Image (spheres, grey):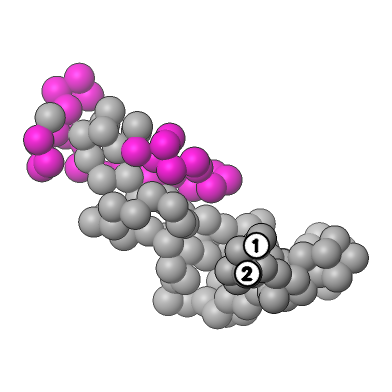
Amino acid sequence: MKPGQFNPMFGGCIRLACTASAPLASEVKEYFAKALGCPLVEAYGMTEVTGPETCTLADDTDRTHVGGCTVNLELKLVDIPDMEYLTTDKDENGNLIPRGEICAKGFGVIPGYYKMP
């Protein structure tokens, strides 16, 4: 199938597919984009956010990330020393590989959980 063609196996009408699960492996994203014959958008979010936190763009061909921050949020990566997840972590080659808890701030974030403010 050429880019821009729609897969007749699915009625030829799929123009965009979206996944909103745990981050998918790049090979899985590539497979589904080719099998469906359309762009595959990946969204990422957490329970406390009432929508996606990040989202890829339809024309993004880099399948190694879950996209940029949505416009209604601010995201921050916070150290978790007990788990040895630090924003200053580096790999064996000295390249920065920040790890930690993703914290969100914005209008779509709930103020607390049931009976837990």
User: Is the residue marked by circle 1 packed among few (<14), some (14-19), or many (20+) residues within 10 Å?
Assistant: few
Rendering coords of residue 16 (x, y %)? 26, 44
User: Is residue 26 rendered magenta in the image?
Assistant: yes
For mark 1, give the secondary structure: loop
Amino acid on which disc 2 is placed: Gly
- Residue 105: image quadrant is bottom right
Extreme-right residue of the structure: 82
Q: Is residue 109 visible?
A: no
The residue under label 1 is: 91
Whole-angstrom CA distance, mark 1 to mark 2, is 5 Å
Amino acid on which disc 1 is placed: Asp
Give the extent of the magenta segment. 2-30
Rendering coords of residue 91 (x, y %)? 65, 62
Rendering coords of residue 83 (x, y %)? 85, 61
**Discs 1, 2 touching: Cβ within 8 Å:** yes
The residue under label 2 is: 94
